[in-house]
Every structure is written in C-alpha cells, then in structure tokens.
C-alpha cells in the first residue's frame, strides 16, 4: 500500500551543499530496450554533483533505490544527518528505503507532489544522460547497462565540467578532491569492466570512448511498446 507520508521538503530547491556527504538527490528513469524497459536509479552528491550511487534493473521496485543508496553510503563518506532528497515516487516511501535511510543516519526529504522542479538536480542528470547517449532502443539490457556505466564513470564523473563558485570549471571528481582530499580516493570505485576496457583505462579518453560507443552501437528498431505502468 502506497500512502502519502508526511515527509518534509528539507532542501527547499536549494540544490547545493558546502561539503561532500551532507546533501544528496536521487531519482529513477527508464530506457527502452528490445528486452523490455531498463531502469537506472542514481544518487548525486549536491556538493560535487558527482554520481556516488547507482543501480540498474529490469524493475523499479524499492530494492532498486535501496541499492543505489547503499552504494552511495559505501562510496560517498556520508555525514550523520546528511539529507537524502527525492520526489514522492512510491519507491522512496517504501519501508525498505526508509529503513536504509535510518541505517545510514540520514534525513529524508521529498519534494511536493507533481512538481518536477522540486527534484531538478537529479532529473537534470537524466536529461543530460539521455541527450548524450541517445534515447533509441538498445539491443539488450546489457548494452544499455554498459552505455550508462560508461557515461557515469568514464564521462560524467571524470570529464564533465561544471562551474564551481570558488574553483571555477572543474569535474565532479576534481570538486571532491578540492573539498575533501582525504575522501577523494576512497570515493573512486575500483576499475569496472565495461565493453572496451575498464573504467580506469577509459579515463584518459573517456569523451571519445563515449562517442564511439554511441555511434557504434547500431541499435535496432523494435515494435512499438507501451510506456511503463508507473515510474513516479
């Protein structure tokens, strides 16, 4: 049963944080494949705009967002009382997710019902992802997973420049290094096998690798599919 729980809108559309591990934003989207819909969930650190947690599956049950938050907890150096913000999607109101919030000693924040602007930081990342890797039909869940992993680890976190008010144009990982050098190394994941090499091997030529993957994928068109029943 999905009930309208009285979560507070703690961040008030202020999608910034002074230090890593003090403010997070999460969201889910869906991508079409010939094998059915593919759902990525992410957790973004609002101080660095780094994607510090993510999970992907062929469903959007609560365990998907729990897995993304668990990864963020292991990787992001989260501070006690850190705010975890999301929309009011049913995945974020489930007991499993709320228990993980308590386990990590976080505070849960939710935007108002029906307002996409209340979770703009998380939603804008998925807008960028779709613009960069395309919204065509992938051949399989695995090809979609590979492209998303490549974009997050080799392209976005390591090469995407954002203007920081103090440091100028820096990448999310550079921002973390500047703000908290003692945690920057711990936050970097081990090399992850993706098509064409590991995430570490791809770092030096990440942008070109992403372009090659996008143009060389040759996705096939599929029969018209209905939209997912509910991704809040």
Image (spheres, rainbow, N blue to C red):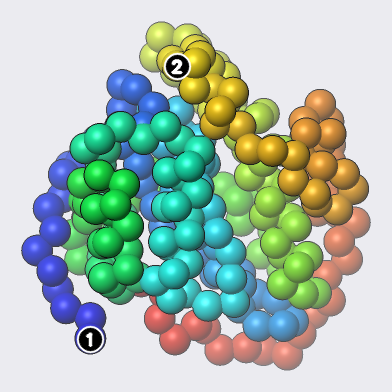
Q: Quadrant of the N terminus?
A: bottom left
Tell which of 181 and 202 is nearer to you: 181
Q: Is residue 7 left or right of residue 142?
A: left
Tell me residue 157's x, y (percent).
60, 34
Tell me residue 93's x, y (percent).
25, 68
- Residue 143 seen: yes
Q: Residue at image x 31%, y 21%? A: 18
Tell me residue 60's x, y (percent).
47, 74
Q: Residue at image x 56%, y 47%? A: 128
Residue 41 numbered mark, or none: none
Q: Secondary structure at mark 1?
A: loop
Q: Secondary structure at mark 2?
A: loop
Q: Is residue 76 left or right of residue 6?
A: right
Tell me residue 203's x, y (percent).
77, 31
Q: Residue at image x 80%, y 51%? A: 194
Q: Residues within 10 Å of mark 2 (few under 14, many from 20)?
A: some
Residue 102, compared with residue 36, is above or below; it is above
Residue ID for mark 1: 1
Q: How far apart are the alpha carbons under marks 2 and 1?
A: 41 Å
- Residue 116 seen: no
Residue 183, compared with residue 49, is above or below; it is above
User: Outermost residue toward the left?
Assistant: 6
Residue ID for mark 2: 180
Q: Residues within 10 Å of mark 1 (few under 14, many from 20)?
A: few
In which image quadrant can residue 36 be found? bottom right
Residue 77, compared with residue 132, is above or below; it is above
Q: Is residue 15 left or right of residue 124?
A: left
Quick one: label 2 or label 1, which is nearer the N terminus? 1
Tell which of 128 and 178 is nearer to you: 178
Q: Quadrant of the C terminus?
A: bottom left
């Amino acid at each position: 049963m999905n009930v309208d729980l009285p979560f507070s809108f703690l961040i008030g559309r202020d999608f910034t944080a002074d230090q890593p591990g003090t403010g997070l934003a999460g969201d889910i989207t869906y991508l079409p494949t010939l094998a059915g819909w593919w759902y990525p969930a992410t957790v973004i650190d609002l101080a660095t705009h780094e994607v510090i947690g993510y999970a992907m599956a062929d469903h959007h049950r609560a365990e998907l967002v729990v897995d993304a938050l668990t990864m963020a907890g292991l990787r992001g150096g989260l501070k006690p009382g850190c705010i975890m913000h999301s929309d009011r999607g049913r995945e974020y109101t489930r007991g499993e997710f709320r228990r993980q919030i308590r386990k990590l000693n976080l505070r849960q924040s939710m935007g108002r019902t029906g307002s996409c602007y209340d979770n703009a930081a998380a939603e804008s990342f998925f807008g960028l992802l779709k613009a960069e890797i395309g919204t065509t039909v992938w051949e399989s869940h695995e090809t979609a997973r590979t492209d998303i992993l490549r974009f997050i680890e080799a392209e976005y976190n390591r090469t995407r420049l954002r203007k920081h008010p103090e440091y100028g144009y820096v990448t999310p990982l550079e921002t973390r290094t500047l703000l908290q050098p003692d945690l920057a190394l711990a936050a970097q994941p081990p090399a992850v096998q993706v098509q064409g090499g590991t995430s570490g091997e791809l770092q030096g030529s990440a942008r070109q690798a992403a372009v090659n993957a996008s143009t060389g994928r040759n996705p096939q068109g599929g029969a018209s599919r209905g939209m997912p029943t509910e991704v809040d």
